[in-house]
Each structure stands twice: as structure tokens, then as C-alpha cells.
């Protein structure tokens, strides 16, 4: 499986418009989990979670500029 | 060997041709255990990137436009084969059907509450009783506080006709104080945004950002 790099995580999260932020949050953090046995071990996702908080703060600044 | 990548569970089949998924694989609609699953056959799960996440959301929006109930799957949900999918769905059928009913005809709007102070939730009451009682009272207060967003009180009256369900996540890490997900009837997104915009002055000093409509990702949980 292709493993996302730090650069890939940064690429996702530095697109700081609200819709991208919520898209990442919705797809990676929500949605139905149908079974504990389902393979959800996507490398790089933890990294994305770690950076999500920082980007949420950045999104606030984007919002203020509108 | 290919495996089955799950996009969503649906209350009925899509009204348009399934087309291709995020790995350019042909999508299939599988009816199992009284549920309809939208799946693709992939060699490995797609790696999360901005393009892939956007593509998965776009695929789902396209195929579910005319479908009453949609439960988007968590990104990366992969099963061994159709038999494994059928087995899981069969075991969870009641909870999944209930969840599909709950989101039928609805979409999600997302509010983020921003501010420079750590929220407006009322502090805990005076500590009374012994250490055990105080500990339990503290736990209960923390539990209840995690579900309250008093910052939004000026907005609630404007949204009461639109909001079917709410999910609250308090962050209390300024500037982000809370995320509130609202389940609203499809087509109500514009009225929802208007209501939020109309309440901005009353919400001061707290600010809100709104996004949506989304598929009901935050409401797609099913009881185990």
C-alpha cells in the first residue's frame, strides 16, 4: 500500500478553506464503521489527525479575513 | 487479489449509472441482507490525499442524489470479499437500517464555534459531599459540559424548525471552541446559512463558520 508522506499530510491540511477542512474531518473521522474487523489501518491518517487541530486554527484566520 | 472497498450503505439503488470509483475501478451496487452497498473492487485501499478525499465525496454525492437514505462509510473501509461484506451487514442489519431511517431525506450542516476564551459553559456548582461524591459530580459535569454549546443559544430559536438532530464536540482549545453538526432536511442548507448569518451579531463575542450541505457523515454511526 502506498504510504502518505509528511508532505502528503501537509498538502491535505494546508488547503485551509473550510470545506476542505470539513471534508477531511468528515471522511477520516466520521462515517459509518460497519465492523471492528474492517481494515482501517491507513498509514498516515494519525499524522493527519495530529495536524488537524493546527489547521482548524488556521481556518479561523481564513474566516476572519472574509 | 482484489478486495471490496465500501463507499456507502444506501436505502435503495442509485438512479444513475454507477460509473467509476476513486481508484478508477468500476463501482458495483450490491444488495445484501436487505441493504444496498456501494462498493468497488480494489487491490489496495486508496491512500488519503486531498484529491482522493474530494473524489470520494464527489462519487458519493453523484450517486446518492436521488437516494433517500445514505450512510457514508468511514474512509478506508475495506473487506476481504462480498461474503465478508454480507456477513458484517447481516450481523448489523437492525442497527444499520435504523441509522438509514434516521438520516433519510436529510443532509448535514457543520458549525464551528470560535472564540478567544475557553467557552461559555457554566462552571461546576459548589463542591459538596465527600471526595467520592465530588469526584462523581465532577465526572458528570464534564460529561454534560461536553454536550453543551451555550455560545449558540442566540442561534437556537432560528434553527429550531430546521434541525432534526445535533452532534456536539467541544474542543475548548481557543480559537476553536466547539464543532456542532446538524442534521437538516435536504434542500434546507440555504435557509440554514441565512439563519446563521442573521444571528452573527447576537452570537458575539463568539464567531461561527458554517459549511455544507454534506452527506450525513457525522450521523452515520450505528449502534453496535
Image (cartoon, coloured by chain):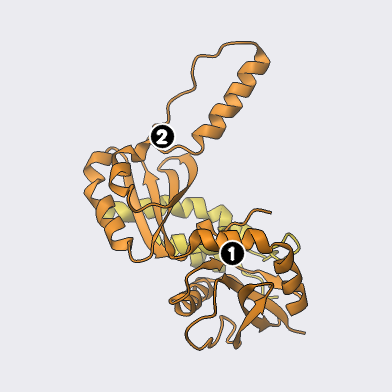
Instruction: Give the quadrant of residue A14.
Output: bottom left
Residue at image position (57%, 11%) is: B128
Q: Colour of chain A?
A: yellow
Q: Colour of chain B?
A: orange
Q: Chain of mark 2?
A: B
Image side of residue B203 versus residue B31, left or right: left
Image side of residue B41 versus residue B128, left or right: right
Q: Is residue B161 above or below residue B190?
A: above
Are the residues flagged by discs 1 and 2 from a single subunit? Answer: no
Residue at image position (64%, 58%) is: B95
Q: Which residue is mark 2?
A: B119
Q: Position of residue A2 (x, y in %)?
A: 67, 75
Q: Secondary structure at mark 2?
A: loop
- The number of discs equals 2
**Are there few (<14), some (14-19), or many (20+) residues within 10 Å of tag 2?**
many
The residue lying toward the viewer, choosing from B197 and B93, is: B93
Instruction: Give the quadrant of residue B42.
Output: bottom right
Q: Which residue is mark 1?
A: A6
Residue at image position (46%, 66%) is: B215
Amino acid at each position: 500500500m502506498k504510504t502518505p508522506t509528511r508532505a502528503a499530510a501537509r498538502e491535505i491540511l494546508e488547503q485551509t478553506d473550510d470545506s476542505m477542512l470539513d471534508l477531511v474531518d468528515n471522511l477520516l473521522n466520521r462515517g459509518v464503521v460497519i465492523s471492528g474487523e474492517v481494515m482501517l489501518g491507513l498509514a498516515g491518517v494519525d499524522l493527519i489527525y495530529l495536524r488537524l487541530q493546527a489547521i482548524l486554527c488556521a481556518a479561523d484566520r481564513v474566516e476572519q479575513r472574509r | 487479489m482484489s478486495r471490496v472497498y465500501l463507499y456507502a450503505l444506501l436505502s435503495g439503488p442509485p438512479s444513475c449509472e454507477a460509473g467509476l470509483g476513486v481508484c478508477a475501478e468500476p463501482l458495483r451496487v450490491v444488495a445484501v441482507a436487505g441493504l444496498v452497498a456501494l462498493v468497488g473492487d480494489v487491490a489496495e485501499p486508496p491512500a488519503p490525499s486531498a484529491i482522493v478525499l474530494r473524489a470520494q465525496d464527489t462519487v458519493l454525492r453523484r450517486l446518492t442524489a436521488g437516494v433517500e437514505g445514505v450512510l457514508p462509510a468511514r474512509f478506508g473501509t475495506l473487506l476481504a470479499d462480498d461474503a465478508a461484506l454480507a456477513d458484517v451487514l447481516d450481523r448489523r442489519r437492525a442497527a444499520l437500517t435504523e441509522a438509514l431511517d434516521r438520516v433519510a431525506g436529510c443532509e448535514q450542516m457543520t458549525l464551528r464555534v470560535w472564540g478567544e476564551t475557553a467557552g461559555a459553559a457554566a462552571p461546576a456548582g459548589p463542591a459538596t459531599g465527600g471526595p467520592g461524591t465530588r469526584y462523581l459530580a465532577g465526572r458528570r459535569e464534564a460529561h454534560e459540559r461536553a454536550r453543551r454549546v451555550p455560545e449558540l443559544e442566540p442561534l437556537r430559536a432560528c434553527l429550531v424548525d430546521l434541525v432534526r438532530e445535533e452532534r456536539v464536540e467541544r474542543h475548548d482549545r481557543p480559537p476553536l471552541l466547539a464543532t456542532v453538526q446538524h442534521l437538516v432536511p435536504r434542500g434546507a442548507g440555504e435557509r440554514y446559512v441565512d439563519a446563521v448569518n442573521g444571528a452573527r451579531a447576537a452570537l458575539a463575542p463568539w464567531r461561527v463558520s458554517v459549511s455544507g450541505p454534506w452527506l450525513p457523515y457525522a450521523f452515520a454511526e450505528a449502534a453496535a
